Amino acid sequence: MGRRLRELGWKIGAVVTRNESSARRAVRFIGAGTPLAAMSRRILQSTCILIATPDSAVASVAEELSRIGGEELKGHIILHTSGALDSTVLRAVRQQGAAVGSMHPLQTFSGVTVPPLEGKFFAIEGDAQAVRKARKIARAVGAAPSPIEAPNKPLYHAAGALAAGHALVVVESAIQLLMALGTKRAEAMRALLPMTKQVLQNYERLGVKAAWTGPLARGDYEVVAKHVAALQGYSTEYHNAYEALNRLAEKILPRDGEGDAERNDDLYAAHSSSAKISKRTKVVSIGGKG
């Protein structure tokens, strides 16, 4: 964020990290700023202060800023970039007169490359002055600022975790399952990733109903029961995760001719336990050689 804002002409002041060497690296990466290994009054020279620490450190950073700045924080804007925390975690500096808010880019950061921020969703909330500044920053980098109610931030962040980190868990678990059968990692990735990518492309272009595939989508509960039995013998964690995902899929994913009103939370459990074959099974006759 600092690097992109510097490229756009924003002035960078103090850059504070946990030690001097990392502060210098950060300044080199950003291309501007004064490296500091600890918070000091030099931070107050900037009217906008951005806290981009782990969630567990945000409150303590705000308390230290309050101790250092005191009433001089009045008129300052202090934002944090946590996805799960709201602006109330900055109460220590708000009590000193600062305007506070949260500004979270819905984007993964690997620490290796600089991801594009153009078009990305920025969830913003807090005091009016802080929200205006956060919107200005988001628009400056080409992002799409969007208001969010403070109590909703944990659910919002959970959505991001499901779509990113947990999606990776599912794919990696499938790859490790093939590897357990003797397939090399590179081969397992070549086998599974194109299928995953295709499903996501279908989802984006055609919608959820057309993209949903697999035995559960077809109502082929006998096959699902075989999966459950095989995974039960392989790993408790795999078995439980597969069961939980199937139950969630039964609840939220649509089938042809089936509306939400017809949903039954126990549908998957009833069919998978008895291994019944769905009445929607189709038979296709294929002519020709072979």
Image: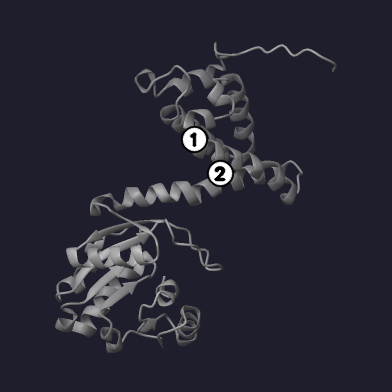
Q: How many circles with numbers are drawn on the protein? A: 2
At x 59% / y 45%, what residue is drawn?
Answer: 171
In the depicted structure, whether residue 238 falls above or below residue 120? above
- Residue 236 visible? The answer is no
Q: Amino acid at mark 1?
A: Leu
Q: Position of residue 180 (x, y in %)?
A: 71, 44
The foreground one among 206 and 84 is 206
Q: CA distance from mark 2 to mark 1?
A: 10 Å
Callout 2 crowding tier (Cα within 10 Å): few <14, some 14–19, many ≥20: some
Contact between labelled residues 1 and 2, with CB atoms less than 8 Å apart: yes
Out of 264 and 115, give the one closest to the viewer.
115
Q: Secondary structure at mark 2?
A: helix
Q: Position of residue 214 (x, y in %)?
A: 59, 28
| Snapshot quadrant of residue 143 | bottom left
Residue 58 falls in image quadrant: bottom left
Quadrant in which the N terminus is drawn: bottom left
Provide the residue designation for mark 1.
245
Using the rendered image of the protein, determine whether residue 227 is visible from the camera's viewpoint: yes
Asked which secondary structure carries label 1, the reply is helix
Q: Residue at x 26, y 68 (%)?
A: 133
Quarter the C terminus occupies: top right
Residue 257 horizontal/vertical position (percent)? 45, 16
Quadrant in the rendering for residue 279: top right
Residue 126: where, in percent of width, then height?
A: 22, 61
Q: Is residue 257 left or right of residue 137?
A: right
Q: How is the image coloured?
A: one colour
Which residue in the rendered view is the most extreme toward the right? Answer: 289
In this rendering, the answer to whether 87 lies above or below 265 is below
Q: For mark 2, what is the residue?
A: 170
Q: Amino acid at mark 2?
A: Val
